[in-house]
Structure formats: structure tokens, C-alpha cells
Image (spheres, grey):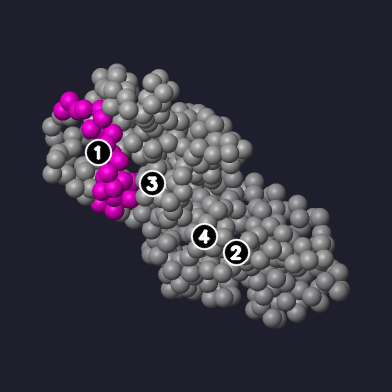
């Protein structure tokens, strides 16, 4: 898809207003001829088009690569276009949508063009520091300096299906090493699976994704509509609470999003141990970071890095952060130790504890070990009535103290792990009552309503 075709696909019909000035040709005659042929082939005078348009009525600035112009390579003129457009978007307080398709730096211009990636990155960081949105769509192929600069700085980054995405171009690797680069690594799908990008989205579906993302990031809050739950929490039996939170049908973070949220944009793979999303809880925009009890992956260092990324995203965007705790514990393995599990827990705790945006932690179910503690230190903490928090699962505590697991119910009762106990100690600010007739839907709705009430206050 050409740059103009992409603009026509993504932006509202007739809304695009170009910002580019005519490109001045190089004085070098051989290079000048290459530029002339490239312009003739691509139908553009440079490898990038910039301008302003609307997506579902919302004004945005756009930066779009044209691969047919010298493989979308970025020389000094193209770089100046990007930087100028970014600065104009910042001045006009417009979100930026960038769509890359590039082999990277233009080799005909060498180091001067290469260094422009720094200038582009600085302009984008100033844009983000101003609290403005930057959304990135990676097209086939996106490699080299483009991927290592403005292609990797988005608040949300997706790629088209099957796209070649990577830092080192496979042709360059083969020329340098005499063998092909391993297949299947530099693909959109593989990078999404490893958390390098947020997802794989076809170009035809891009307007829908942008509409959802901008709906959270740009549109104002709407009045809450979910019913508020009244009443107070009852005394609970600790071991009964532990068993309740382990039941397969227990409410989880996906239920919270399904029944209490709208306009959700997921930023992690479906089986990730930690879910990160842009969403609206009962009409209130936020970044949500939640431990996913239905995920197939244990919560290891990579999942905790995703959690911290969500925390930093909230800070950059100036949005409230909601963390959801529901974990039997962090991953216990040699690989997790070697990947710095303890350090990742520490970094999550310190990051969350020092954010300047409003923060809310929801103790939803199980809260075992450092994995739970990593998402706890918010300014306000609420809990479901049967949720619990402990340094280890009761069986683990029993194994340490009694050298067996038979004393787990006794340890659960003596360690003050229940939501009412934690509220009495001042750790939890509010407990959401649970009823015997509760379904996952009704409890998820009640918790979402409680979150929204807090977000409205802040």
C-alpha cells in the first residue's frame, strides 16, 4: 500500500491537508538522477508524507512512509519533514499517527542522514513530554534506524500481518555473515508474542483501532452509569476466602473489562501473565495493568516488565492507573532468577509508588508473594471481600513453619491476610461486599463502579 493509499484508508474522506514543502534536489548529479527516478516511480517527491487530517472526526497529525521512494529510506530532507511535522503537531496539541515502511537510513547520504534519527527522536520525546499521544503502525518492511527511532517510540505500536520488522535487515545480515538470518524472528507476529510490539492489525482495521485508542486518550470522561453496590463487608473465614479465590469461575481481570469497561485496547498478547490495556471503566479513561488468572504464562520477569511499561504509559499520557492483583505468585524457576525476577518486582514497586498520576490498586482475588506486592502500592487500594494478600500461599507458609502443608488453614487464619483484616490495618481503603449469589458479571460490575467512583474524585 502506498503512502497516499494508506492516508485514504485511515483518515476521514477528504480530511487530509498536506504540510510538506517541495523537496530540493541534491547537487550531486548521480544522486539527483536516483531521486528523480524514485519520484517518478513513487509519485511523491520524498520518502515521507506529513500533514493533518481526522480519524472519525478527531484531528490528528500523520507521518507516513512511502517505500517506493528509495525503499522508504530517510535522508536529511525526509528527516526534516518529520521533525517539522512533529513540532507543529506539538504546537497545535495534536495526537500523531505514524505509519512506517522503510529500510532505514539513506545510504547515499551516510552519517548526516543517520544522525537525523536523534533529532527525530528528540522531537517526539518533547511531544510525549507535553502529554500528547503518539501512535505507531509498522508496515512491511520496517528496519534499521527507522525501527530503532521513531518506529519504536509509540505509546501504542502495532504492525500489519506478516510484516518484516527488525533492526538488522536480513540482506545485510546474510552479506556480513554468509548465511541467512533465522526465519520467523523478524515478523510482526513473533514480535507481538514477545511483547516487543502491542499487536498485529491489518491496515483495513487501523481506523477502528485508532478510533478506540483516541476514544480513551482524547475524548473526555462520560458520566458513570453502572449501579453502585451498598452495604459493608462481613467477617470472613481466611481459608474459605483462599479456596473461593482459587475456583475456576472466580471473577478475573477479563471479566472486569468485559462487564465494566468500554473502548478497551489490549496492549499484550492474550496469554500474557499480565494484561495491559487502555480502557474506560464505567466511562472513566485509564490505563489498566492486571494480573490475568486465565493466562497460560506464569508471571515472570517479562510480564513484570510489561506491567512497568503500563505504569510508565499512564504517567506519560497523564491518565489514571488501575492495577488489578490476582496471582498465586510469581514464576519460580531458574530462568526467572537469571532474568532478574526480584529486580523486576522491586522496579514495579518503586515505579508505582512514585507515579504522579492518580493510582488505584484492586485486590481482586489471590494475592500471593512479591508478584502481588509489585502492583499494590497505589494511593488508594480497594479489595473484593474474599480477596487476600500474603507473603506466600498458606501452604508455603505452613511448609516453612511446620514442615508440612497440613497447617495451611491455621496459617491463613493467623497471618491476617483477609480483606477485612487488611482494611482494619489500614492497608486497604475500601472492601467491596460479595454475595453468595454473585456471578462474575455482578462482582465485576460492582468493582468497576467502585473504581470509577474513585477516578471521578481524582
Front-lying residue, 342 or 48: 342
Q: Earlier in the sequence, mark 3 or mark 2?
A: 2
Q: Which residue is mark 3?
A: 292
Q: Which residue is mark 1?
A: 244
Q: Position of residue 302 (x, y in %)?
A: 53, 44
Label 1 to label 2: alpha-carbon separation: 42 Å
Q: Nearer the viewer, mark 3 or mark 1?
A: 1
* Residue occupied by mark 4: 158
- Name the residue rendered at 45%, 28% in the picture: 353
Q: Nearer the viewer, residue 300 or 190?
A: 300
Residue 184 falls in which quadrant of the image?
bottom right
Position of residue 30 measured from the top left corner of the image (x, y, whole percent): 86, 74
Kindly indicate whether the residue at mark 1 contacts the one at mark 3 (C-beta within 8 angstroms).
Answer: no
The quarter in which the N terminus is drawn is bottom right
The answer to which of marks 1 and 2 sits earlier in the sequence is 2
User: What whole-number distance in Å separates the C-alpha atoms at marks 3 and 4?
Assistant: 22 Å
Judged from the image, the secondary structure of the residue bearing numbered disc 2 is loop
Q: Residues within 10 Å of mark 2 (few under 14, many from 20)?
A: many
- The numbered mark, 4 or 2, whose residue comes first in the sequence reads 4
Q: Is 325 covered by the magenta stretch?
A: no
Amino acid at each position: 500500500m502506498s503512502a497516499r493509499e494508506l492516508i485514504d484508508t485511515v483518515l476521514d474522506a477528504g480530511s487530509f491537508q498536506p504540510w510538506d514543502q517541495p523537496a530540493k534536489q541534491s547537487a550531486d548529479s548521480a544522486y539527483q538522477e536516483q531521486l528523480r527516478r524514485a519520484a517518478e516511480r513513487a509519485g511523491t517527491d520524498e520518502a515521507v508524507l506529513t500533514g493533518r487530517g481526522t480519524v472519525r472526526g478527531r484531528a490528528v497529525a500523520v507521518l507516513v512512509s512511502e517505500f517506493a521512494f528509495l525503499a522508504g529510506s530517510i535522508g536529511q530532507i525526509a528527516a526534516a519533514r518529520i521533525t517539522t511535522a512533529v513540532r507543529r503537531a506539538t504546537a497545535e496539541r495534536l495526537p500523531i499517527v505514524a505509519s512506517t515502511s522503510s529500510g532505514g537510513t539513506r545510504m547515499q547520504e551516510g552519517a548526516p542522514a543517520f544522525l537525523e534519527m536523534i533529532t527525530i527522536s528528540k522531537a517526539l520525546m518533547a511531544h510525549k513530554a507535553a502529554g500528547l499521544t503518539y501512535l505507531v503502525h509498522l508496515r512491511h518492511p520496517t528496519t534499521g534506524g527507522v525501527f530503532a527511532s521513531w518506529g519504536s517510540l509509540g505509546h501504542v505500536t502495532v504492525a500489519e500481518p506478516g510484516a518484516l520488522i527488525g533492526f538488522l535487515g536480513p540482506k545485510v545480515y546474510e552479506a556480513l555473515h554468509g548465511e541467512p538470518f533465522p526465519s520467523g524472528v523478524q515478523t510482526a507476529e513473533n514480535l507481538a508474542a514477545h511483547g516487543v510490539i502491542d499487536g498485529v492489525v491489518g491496515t483495513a482495521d487501523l481506523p477502528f483501532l485508532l478510533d478506540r485508542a483516541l476514544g480513551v486518550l482524547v475524548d473526555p470522561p462520560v458520566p458513570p452509569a453502572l449501579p453502585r453496590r451498598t452495604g459493608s463487608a462481613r467477617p470472613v473465614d481466611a481459608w474459605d476466602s483462599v479456596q473461593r479465590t482459587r475456583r475456576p469461575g472466580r471473577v478475573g481481570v477479563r471479566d472486569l473489562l468485559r462487564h465494566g469497561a468500554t473502548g478497551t485496547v489490549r496492549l499484550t498478547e492474550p496469554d500474557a501473565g499480565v494484561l495491559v490495556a487502555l480502557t474506560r471503566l464505567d466511562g472513566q479513561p485509564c490505563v489498566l495493568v492486571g494480573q490475568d488468572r486465565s493466562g497460560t504464562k506464569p508471571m515472570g520477569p517479562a510480564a513484570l516488565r510489561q506491567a512497568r511499561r503500563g505504569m510508565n504509559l499512564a504517567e506519560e499520557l497523564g491518565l489514571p492507573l488501575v492495577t488489578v492483583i490476582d496471582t498465586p505468585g510469581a514464576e519460580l524457576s531458574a530462568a526467572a532468577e537469571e532474568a532478574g525476577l526480584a529486580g523486576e518486582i522491586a522496579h514495579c514497586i518503586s515505579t508505582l509508588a512514585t507515579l504522579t498520576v492518580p493510582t488505584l490498586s484492586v485486590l481482586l482475588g489471590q494475592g500471593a508473594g512479591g508478584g502481588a506486592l509489585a502492583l499494590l502500592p497505589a494511593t488508594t487500594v480497594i479489595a473484593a471481600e474474599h480477596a487476600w494478600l500474603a507473603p506466600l500461599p498458606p501452604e508455603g507458609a505452613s511448609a516453612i513453619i511446620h514442615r508440612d502443608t497440613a497447617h495451611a488453614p491455621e496459617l491463613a487464619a493467623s497471618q491476617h491476610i483477609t480483606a477485612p483484616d487488611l482494611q482494619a490495618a489500614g492497608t486497604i481503603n475500601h472492601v467491596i461486599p460479595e454475595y453468595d449469589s454473585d456471578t462474575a458479571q455482578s462482582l465485576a460490575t460492582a468493582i468497576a463502579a467502585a473504581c470509577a467512583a474513585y477516578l471521578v474524585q481524582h
